[in-house]
Image (spheres, helix red, strand yellow):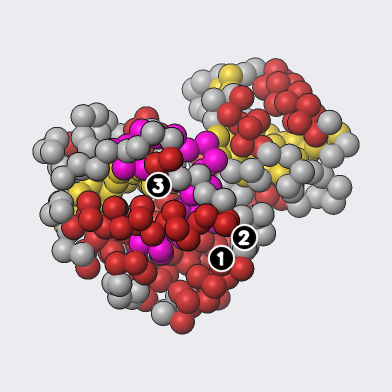
Amino acid sequence: MTLQAQPHEDKLRETPARESQLHEPRIAALLAFFRSHPRLLLTSHARPDGDAIGSVLALAEVLDQLGCKADVVLADPIPHIYRTLPNLDRIHHCASADDVDPDPNTPAILLECDGIARTGLLGLEGRTLINIDHHASGRLFGSVNWIDEHACAVAAMVYRIAIAAEVVITPSLATCLYTAILSDTGSFTYSSTTADTFAIAHDLATKGADPSQIARDLYFSNPISKVRLLATALGNLQCDGPIAWTWVTSEDMARAGADAEDCEGVVNYVISTAGIEAAVFLRGIADTHRFRLSIRSKGKLDVSRVAEHFGGGGHRSASGCTMDGPLDLAIERILTQLRTGLC
């Protein structure tokens, strides 16, 4: 069974007034697809964050209850702070989806990706693809596409699938979804956080998610390398009017014994500065002259448009991209775009 995407409307970029009638048929179509395929691959983007990891684990459990065999595969390792999530052992880490399931007839579900390249995996070409995303920069690339940029996290979309499927929301499923939502809303601080976000969080807490323990796992279990790297980044902090930025080089990371995982969340300290409306953190990529940028806004500026200008994407208040160096030029280019956007 193959469900073909319809032109434009199938992207389902909802406005709040239309959300209820648009979600139901799309979720029904997804469930029909899932039930008609006994085996599915499930993945998300490279360098997985809390939403990616929690959502693939949660959707895998939903698929289990629907009678599907779900093989979960990610290209990159799980960051330290998410290693207490239940059922992590079902995630395969490999370079190609073919290493897990070489059958090209097995469809693949991609969560919060704008195409197969974003997964970092080989072996997805030619497969039937299901695309579930909540980024404003999401694109139609699947046979079935559900993109809801109003969702606070892709985990909120998985939650709606679980409710529509009438599966049991177990404590492990609830924990994965709550973790994903907590991390992807910036601890319920981003503009995507709504009353519905708290309604979902409340329901998950009643079904076994432990908010206090999850928060401790996410925010109070940093390795010393991350704390040392944060000290370097804050020492480099610069401000100019409503814009703040900082950076660490690959050499800084080596001195701190840090890796890319330790850079997660550094930009949130920068955007927390009073009077700052936009913030950037630049991370040097080892053995290259490139930088990975994390961009944040307090709402006045849509930083997803800034990131898209440099080939990246994301949300209105939280986005990212990769840029060529040297460092001074990369800073100049990103600051020019932010200043233009804030004018």
Residue at horizontal 24 percent and vertical 43 percent from the top: 3
SS label for mark 3: strand
Highlighted range, magenta: 135-162
**Front-lying residue, 81 or 117:** 117
Residue at horizontal 61 percent and vertical 49 percent from the top: 265
The mark found on residue 62 in the picture is none
Q: Is residue 272 visible?
A: yes
Q: Are marks 2 and 1 in contact (CB under 8 Å)?
A: yes
The mark found on residue 146 in the picture is 3
Q: In this view, does 185 lie above or below 107?
A: below
Instruction: Name the residue type under label 1.
Output: Thr
Residue 92 position, x and y percent, is 25, 48
The label nearer to you, 1 versus 3, is 3
**Front-lying residue, 92 or 206:** 206
Mark 1 or mark 3: name the one nearer the start of the chain: 3
Q: Does the magenta stretch include residue 163?
A: no
SS label for mark 2: loop
Judge from the rendering whether residue 149 lies leftward or rightward of residue 70; answer left or right: right
* Residue that label 1 marks: 197
**Front-lying residue, 183 or 6:** 6
**Front-lying residue, 37 or 119:** 37
SS label for mark 1: helix
Q: How crowded is mark 2: few (under 14 residues within 10 Å), some or many (20 or more)?
A: many
Judge from the rendering whether residue 196 lies leftward or rightward of residue 317; answer left or right: left
* Residue that label 2 marks: 193
The label nearer to you, 3 versus 2, is 3
Residue at horizontal 32 percent and vertical 38 percent from the top: 5
Mark 3 or mark 2: name the one nearer the start of the chain: 3
Calculate the distance from the C-alpha at mark 2 to the C-alpha at mark 1. Answer: 6 Å
Instruction: Name the residue type under label 3.
Output: Trp
